[in-house]
């Protein structure tokens, strides 16, 4: 059943209103007094926070660009940066989280006239590489904590690394099974349903495109993985910059541990639009873990990180407005 244009407009309007409501709720929880006090402490150093996140976002964009294989030559990096940032911002304020943002990426790439399976494959591969690089860094951070006895005084089980390793092994086994998925399985459940046949055909095209990318572009795959890993590492500098500005001694490894831990907590609450309250909880947990249990510090760190997020959210809204304006002008 084909959805009518009017229904599509209604869906878009409802989605836009819901995102705006959630964005307003996000802004409401930010205490202006806390933000002002934190910014006063940070001073011009807040610009370094913005710069570090800009570099991190740029590295992630380049990682996705390489996942587009040969099709990347027809897409300007600046345009891809805009699309990625708009979609990541959108994903923050939908219950679908990153899935909703990734679906929007596919829609916004349509004007570039790229083969649809290639677009979908690039989004899937880039997301898988981002998750894989993040898990690798998280495991490395936990191993560093255990090796340096940072967790000895915490109420964490001593075999926590082994538990996480088992979970990752199960996930890896599941992914391996997915890679080895045979075409016969599609045929087995196909039946004669026309919609299912069309869906199966499209998914097979995407799957073949993903397989082709892994086989024919190992160099691009390695470059993309390196860029995504660098994206997480540069992004973790935010904690390093903040704590240095606030006068707290911290190493680069500690900042990586902090960031990976907070991201893991946020991932658990990904279904909560904007991760309202979730990120603050992650900040508190991880700061305490490395020995910074000060409540004023926690408040300042959370306020500065939320202010940085608000800055990039506003940039995302502005970029989305430009995209919509261009679409209207071309109609």
Image: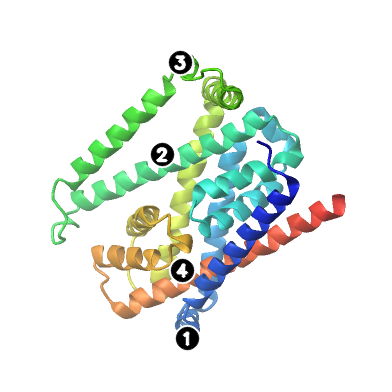
Q: Nearer the viewer, residue 266 or 22?
A: 22
| Crowd tier of the residue under label 1, counting other residues whose Cα lies within 10 Å: few below 14, some 14–19, many 20 or above | few
Is residue 243 rendered to the left or right of residue 212? left
Quadrant of the drawing holding the N terminus: top right
The structure residue drawn at horizontal position 72% and vertical position 43%, both measured from the top left corner, is: 76
Q: Compared to 43, does 53 lie above or below?
A: above
Q: Earlier in the sequence, mark 3 or mark 4?
A: 3
Q: Which mark is residue 25?
A: none
Marks 3 and 4 in Cβ contact (< 8 Å): no
| Crowd tier of the residue under label 4, counting other residues whose Cα lies within 10 Å: few below 14, some 14–19, many 20 or above | many
Q: Which mark is residue 132?
A: 2
The Cα atoms of the two marked residues, 3 and 1, are separated by 61 Å
Q: Which residue, given by chain and number where applicable, does mark 3 sit on?
A: 188
The Cα atoms of the two marked residues, 2 and 3, are separated by 31 Å
The Cα atoms of the two marked residues, 1 and 2, are separated by 39 Å
Q: Earlier in the sequence, mark 2 or mark 3?
A: 2
The Cα atoms of the two marked residues, 2 and 4, are separated by 25 Å
The reply to whether residue 200 is in sight is yes
Q: Which residue, given by chain and number where applicable, does mark 1 sit on?
A: 33
Mark 4: secondary structure: helix
Mark 2: secondary structure: helix
Mark 1: secondary structure: helix
Q: Name the image quarter holding residue 181.
A: top left
Q: Earlier in the sequence, mark 1 or mark 4?
A: 1
The structure residue drawn at horizontal position 52% and vertical position 31%, both measured from the top left corner, is: 221
Q: Which residue, given by chain and number where applicable, does mark 4 sit on?
A: 305
The Cα atoms of the two marked residues, 1 and 4, are separated by 15 Å
Location of residue 211 in the rendering, given as x and y in whole percent from the top left corner: 52, 22
Marks 1 and 4 in Cβ contact (< 8 Å): no
């Amino acid at each position: 059943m084909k959805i009518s244009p009017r229904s599509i407009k209604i869906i878009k309007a409802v989605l836009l209103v819901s995102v705006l409501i959630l964005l307003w709720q996000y802004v409401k929880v930010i205490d202006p007094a806390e933000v002002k006090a934190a910014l006063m402490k940070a001073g011009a150093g807040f610009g370094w926070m913005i710069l570090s996140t800009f570099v991190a976002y740029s590295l992630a964009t380049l990682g996705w660009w390489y996942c587009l294989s040969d099709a990347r030559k027809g897409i300007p990096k600046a345009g891809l940066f805009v699309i990625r940032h708009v979609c990541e911002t959108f994903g923050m304020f939908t219950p679908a989280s990153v899935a909703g943002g990734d679906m929007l990426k596919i829609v916004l790439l349509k004007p570039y006239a790229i083969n649809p399976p290639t677009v979908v494959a690039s989004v899937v591969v880039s997301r898988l590489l981002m998750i894989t690089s993040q898990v690798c860094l998280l495991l490395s951070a936990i191993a560093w904590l255990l090796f340096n006895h940072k967790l000895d005084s915490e109420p964490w089980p001593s075999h926590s690394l082994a538990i996480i390793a088992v979970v990752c092994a199960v996930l890896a086994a599941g992914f391996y099974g997915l890679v080895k998925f045979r075409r016969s399985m599609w045929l087995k459940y196909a039946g004669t349903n026309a919609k299912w046949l069309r869906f199966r055909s499209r998914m097979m095209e995407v799957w073949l495109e993903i397989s082709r990318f892994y086989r024919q572009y190992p160099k691009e795959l390695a470059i993309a993985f390196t860029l995504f890993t660098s994206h997480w590492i540069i992004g973790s500098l935010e904690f390093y910059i903040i704590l240095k500005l606030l006068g707290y001694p911290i190493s680069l490894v500690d900042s990586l541990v902090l960031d990976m831990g907070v991201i893991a907590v946020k991932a658990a609450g990904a279904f909560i639009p904007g991760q309202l309250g979730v990120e603050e909880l992650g900040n508190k947990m991880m700061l305490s873990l490395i020995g910074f249990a000060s409540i004023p510090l926690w408040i300042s760190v959370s306020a500065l990180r939320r202010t940085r997020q608000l800055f990039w959210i506003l940039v995302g809204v502005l970029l989305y407005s430009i995209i919509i304006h261009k679409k209207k002008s071309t109609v």
